Image (tube, helix red, strand yellow):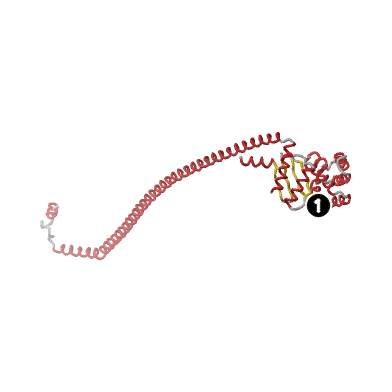
Amino acid sequence: MTDRINGYADAMLAIAQAEGDVKGISDELFAVGRAVDTNEDLRSAVSDSRLPAARKIQIMDDLLDGKARAATKGLVSMVVGAGRGADLGKIAAVLAERAATSSGKQVATVRSAVALSAEQQGRLATALAAKLGTEVDIKVIQDPSVVGGLITTVGDTVIDGSVRTRLNRLRESL
Amino acid sequence: MLTQLQVIAAEGPNGRFIPSDPKELWWAIAAFAVIFYFIATKGFPLIGKALTEGQDAAVADATAAEAAIAASRAKIAEATAQLGDVNAESDRIMADAQETAKQLRVDSTSRTQQLVNDMWAKAQSDVESMKTQATADVQAEVASQAVGAAERVVRASLDDAGQAALVDNYISRLGVS
């Protein structure tokens, strides 16, 4: 399982490097992977063995039409057509880590209740780099359960400044 | 009797007891001697033998009777002893039965008391557990309700500016720490 995911991630990284847009493709694939992981209907559609591969690919093409690079769409079609649509999120996560590593960075997964602007992501990357002593590649996951604030995960390090955690602490103290 | 003898004597030729002819006396003595001889040689041994046999039989009978009496006495003594043993055994069995019954009563009472104690302790423990659980449930419910209310308030008050402020604050704290 892990070998297969690593294999797909390596292949996709090679294609993204060949396309000369590793970060752009990696970011888009990460977003698509998150969508598959968090959307039950979408995950069921791309992992349904009774559904023809062409139909699954068509679903993903329709979803990404006009919103993603052609290379990204092609990679998604490759994975879904191979019957690995349910693993798309894991493959994209490994790809993001390898893409960051290939450019001397670490992936910083940031959970936020709202989307972060490019300016906020830039300031956050700078602050994290100063704190951790290494460049980071920000991957934002929009998660309403965070309520407010951010939860950043870099490797094994978790920096939690979310309202959710404060509410949980309040619940425990009560 | 004497009168009859005198009559018989008067019948004699001389009117006296003593025969008038001395030869008769000699013949009487001889006859007596012969008769006595036969009696002494034949009769006396038989009589003595009979007497001896009777005596032996009597002695044997007496010995057997004494043995029977001794055996009977022994049996009586044995029976008496057995009766004494039976009485003692009966007393012992009764004493054992009473002791057993007494012990059973004591054990039963003890077990019942222990059972009551256990049930009481368990009931107290259950009540304590229920109180603790109920208190914890109430606390959890109150906490859940309070936090739920707080979350609703926070969500309602967190507009875009508030979210941005939280993000900025987070980034600022990263730089400070």
The amino acid marked with disc number 1 is: Arg
Q: Chain of mark 1?
A: A
Residue B38: percent from left, percent from top: 24, 64
Closer-to-camera residue (A33/B70)? A33
Closer-to-camera residue (B160/A164)? B160
Give the number of marks: 1
Mark 1 — residue? A98
Examine the image and state in which quarter residue B53 appears: bottom left
- Residue visible at 88% across and 42% down in the picture: A54
A73 vs B53, left or right, is right
Examine the image and state in which quarter residue B66 appears: bottom left
| Structural crowding at the residue carrying mark 1, measured as other residues with C-alpha within 10 Å and reported as few (<14), some (14–19) or many (≥20) | many
B54 vs A158, left or right, is left
Residue A41: percent from left, percent from top: 80, 38
SS category of the residue bearing label 1: helix
Closer-to-camera residue (A138/B76)? A138
Residue B76: percent from left, percent from top: 34, 53
| Residue placed furthest toward the left | B15
Residue B82: percent from left, percent from top: 37, 52
